[in-house]
Amino acid sequence: MNCPKCRAPIDGFGTGCIACGHSGGDLRRALLWTLVPTGVIAATLGASIAIAEAHRTGSSRNRYSNAIEERDAAGRTQSFAKLMHDAGEVCTSTKRSLFRGDIGTNAVWAIGCGDTGDWMILIADNGATRVAQCGPLEKAGTPCWTPLDS
């Protein structure tokens, strides 16, 4: 191979010219090896996100919340009773429930327990939960029984 600048012989690919110090490369080849893999990766990620969104069931971006939402009324009552028990609270029967919406990847539910009153439940994207009674939240200006979109 010869140097494109001074035509001196160059041994090996990618080494510089000893005669003139020129160390050029093929710009088209460099772009091809950079843009093509990047484009393939971007297309693959975009397609996988689109497929995941198309197969998602439920109203939330949170899979734990969607699992609760897909259950029937008795199963939902059982799920909320377990969540409340894990949080150190009691809710043996759920009179009503409302999926309020998402805050980022966290899901917010309002539930009315037959024995302990109204509660707000925040379900994190890793399955961790936080619960709060609605009475103090209502006094602070955070209504429990309205969707987050409004």
Image (cartoon, rainbow, N blue to C red):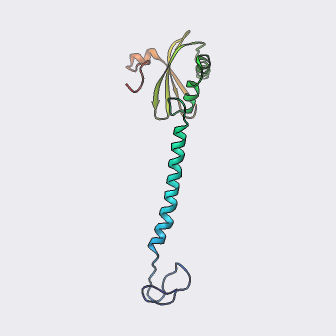
Query: How many marks overall?
Result: 0
Report the residue at 46% width, 30% height from top: 102
Residue 100 appears left or right of 73: left
Residue 120 on image: x %, y %: 49, 20
Residue 107 on image: x %, y %: 50, 29
Residue 41 on image: x %, y %: 52, 55
Q: Quadrant of the rendered structure where residue 72 is?
A: top right
Residue 143 on image: x %, y %: 41, 19
Residue 148 appears left or right of 66: left
Which sits in the foreground, 89 or 48?
48
- Quick one: which residue is furthest to the top in this view? 115
Residue 46 vertical position relative to residue 134 in the rendered view, above or below: below
Q: Quadrant of the rendered structure where residue 27 is?
A: bottom left
Report the residue at 52% width, 47% height from top: 47
Q: Is residue 128 visible?
A: no
Q: Quadrant of the C terminus?
A: top left
Which sits in the foreground, 85 or 56?
56
Q: Is residue 23 visible?
A: yes
Which sits in the foreground, 48 or 138?
48
Report the residue at 46% width, 16% height from top: 134
Q: Quadrant of the rendered structure where residue 147 is?
A: top left
